[in-house]
Image: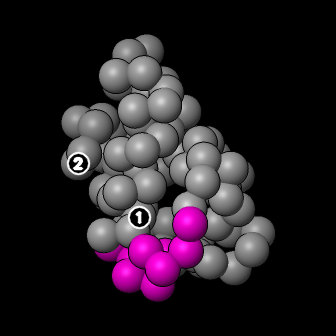
Amino acid sequence: MDRSEAVKKIIGLLEEEFPTLSDMDLKADTALLSSGLLDSFAMVTVLSLVESAFGVSVDVNTLELSLFESPATISEVAIDKKYHKA
């Protein structure tokens, strides 16, 4: 899966899980946290969605919220974990 496909998948997951986002025209660079569209509590759900959809495990002890700022940055986390497992 390339980055573009991963971003589309993330956007689809976000729109499905958070109905208020489906009314917006989410783009790869849409600010989710700094804009207030999602809060840190919602990020727990997003993390779970990413882990399930991409078959990855993310260590929450090393996680930075900035990595979940936009669909693009979320997709980078997913791709990195999927293809560069440590």
Q: Residue at x 60, y 54 (%)?
A: 27
- Assign the N terminus to one quadrant of the image: top left
Label 2 SS = helix
Q: CA distance from mark 2 to mark 1?
A: 13 Å
Q: Residue at x 41, y 50 (%)?
A: 10
Colour approach in the figure: one colour
Q: Does residue 86 appear anywhere in the picture?
A: no
**Callout 2 environment at 10 Å: few (<14), some (14 to 19), or many (20+)?**
few
Report x, y in % for residue 34. Answer: 76, 69
In front of the other: 74 or 28? 28
Q: Residue at x 68, y 68 (%)?
A: 33
Q: Earlier in the sequence, mark 2 or mark 1?
A: 1
Give the left or right position of residue 8, taking residue 39 as reference. left
In front of the other: 24 or 79? 24
Q: Which span of residues is magenta-colored?
A: 17-25
Residue 16 drawn in magenta: no
Residue 19 drawn in magenta: yes
Q: Label 1 is placed on what type of residue?
A: Leu
The image's mark for residue 14 is: 1
The image's mark for residue 73 is: none
> In the rendered image of this protein, does residue 16 appear above or below residue 74?
below
> In the rendered image of this protein, does residue 27 appear above or below residue 55?
below
Q: Nearer the viewer, mark 2 or mark 1?
A: 1
The image's mark for residue 52 is: 2
- Assign the C terminus to one quadrant of the image: top left
Q: Does residue 26 appear anywhere in the picture?
A: yes
Give the left or right position of residue 42, taking residue 40 as reference. left
Q: Farthest residue to the right: give it.
A: 34
Q: Label 2 is placed on what type of residue?
A: Ser
